[in-house]
Amino acid sequence: MTTEESAPEPSEPSRAAGDFDLGALLAGRGAERYELHTRHLNHQLPRMLHTIGFDKVYERAEGAHFWDADGNDHLDMLAGFGVMGLGRHHPVVRKALHDVLDASLADLTRFDCPPLPGLLAEELLTHSPHLDRVFFGNSGTEAVETALKFARYATGRPRVLYCAHAFHGLTTGSLSVNGESGFRDGFAPLLPDTAVPLGDVGALEREVAKGDVAALIVEPIQGKGVHAAPPGYLRAAQELLHRHKALLIADEVQTGLGRTGDFYAYQHEEGVEPDLVCVAKALSGGYVPVGATLGKDWIFRKVYSSMDRVLVHSASFGGNAQAMAAGLAVLSVMENEQIVANVRATGELLRSRLAALVGTYELLADVRGRGLMIGIEFGRPRSLKLRGRWAMLQAARKGLFAQMVVVPLLQKHRILTQVSGDHLEVIKLIPPLIIGEREVDRFVDAFTAVMDDAHEGGLVWEFGRTLVKQAVASR
């Protein structure tokens, strides 16, 4: 048989009567969504959504907006916890995925070197010129797991330091460097890791001096509470770690890819060059899960020290063609549409307009953040009447007031936000990076209306009483 004879022409897709029809399935059973989750998935999710009035039915989405079953548009200020960096269904990313599917590539053979992972790695590394190599996984927690393993192996040391209140993921390794007991409780024993306060160089020095520390992993801006590392901390930590032959790991899963007004958040501080960097979320384009761990050449060479160790760390779906195509399209859009510049300008507009309200509303304590990662913190009011209501909420459960603000933003103003963490009076805004002045106006107007209502003793407090009853009942 000749070579030509051994390579048949691609056949037309089968159109048999029994073909799978996704549209028909959704049309026939889409209305069962909450019932299906209750019966087969995490049964507490629909319960929680019903409780706070978030049990909406969304039919379609585009950019920074989605539409419910009644055709009402909603402004997205959550971006799927940062996944939808370019908004929903960006046409360039969408086309890239159509193209890669239509190409019928021989993907994931495991015994070749396809071009797309190499091209995406090359493009990512142009934004971190001090780094040399990339490992592709499927999520942010996998990117962190990779960094933890690589740091331990490269240094020969067992312990990784992390910052109090950090969030690095929920698989066992990343959970070991998670700074919140609510996530860790019941899953011990975890890995031998130690928490240090964010910004406390002295505490860091005391730990690394013990000689068993492999690395410090740190979010340049913590997602929980939106707390930034103090100026100079990352540089001081890097110098201290390197002096003790330990590594600096930057978790940029949420802060990376333009979120804070630079490609990476650590780049806001001159001279900071982490040994390992974790990215994910926005790199997916909102379509195909992908995570990446960028690192220095010597670290990768230690881990993959011989051909016998070629698969010592791998991921079954890591580097798959669809994820790589999505990532390449995302980076192309970021450059061509000047996404980082838009984040700087729009983020400063949003933050400054919200910060100007702090003196107007006694329940509004602080507005902080960088780029389009902004925290709105509420605090104890001065007036006697509001103080009594605040105390009632705090006695029932800390964080209820922030939830009281989030709910009317959705129900009355059709704006999706969420609290920054359990037991926190902080709302975190992480909208798609493509928003502009129109979306800023809409959010600020709605937030002002909700705060007016809260200070006037309006319907916000009626909902607060409902939350108090539910909080007390759940004890």
Image (spheres, grey):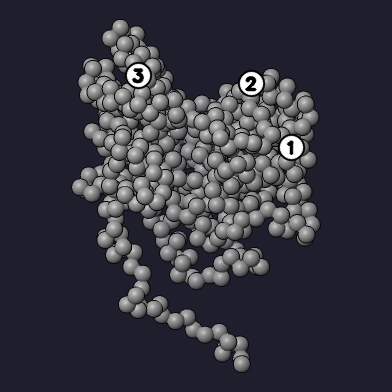
Numbered disc 1: secondary structure: loop
Q: Residue 411: x, y in percent?
A: 25, 35
Mark closest to the chain's N terminus, 1 or 3: 1
Mark drawn on residue 393: 3
* Location of residue 49 by image quarter: top left
Quadrant of the drawing holding the C terminus: top left
Q: Residue 65: x, y in percent?
A: 31, 45
Neighbour tally class for label 2: few under 14, some 14-19, many 20 plus, Cα within 10 Å = some
Numbered disc 3: secondary structure: helix
Q: Residue 464: x, y in percent?
A: 29, 23
Q: Amino acid at mark 1?
A: Pro
Residue picked out by circle 2: 200
Does 141 sit left or right of 286 as displayed?
A: right
Evaluate whether residue 117 shows in this view: no
Residue picked out by circle 1: 158
Marks 2 and 3, how far apart in space?
Answer: 32 Å
Neighbour tally class for label 3: few under 14, some 14-19, many 20 plus, Cα within 10 Å = many
Q: Amino acid at mark 2?
A: Asp
Closer to us: mark 2 or mark 3? 3
Mark closest to the chain's N terminus, 2 or 1: 1
Residue toward you, 374 or 458: 458
Neighbour tally class for label 1: few under 14, some 14-19, many 20 plus, Cα within 10 Å = some
For residue 14, above or below residue 470 = below
The answer to whether the residue labelled 2 contacts the one labelled 3, judged by CB atoms less than 8 Å apart, is no
For residue 122, above or below residue 364 = below
Marks 2 and 1, how far apart in space?
Answer: 22 Å
Residue toward you, 300 or 405: 405
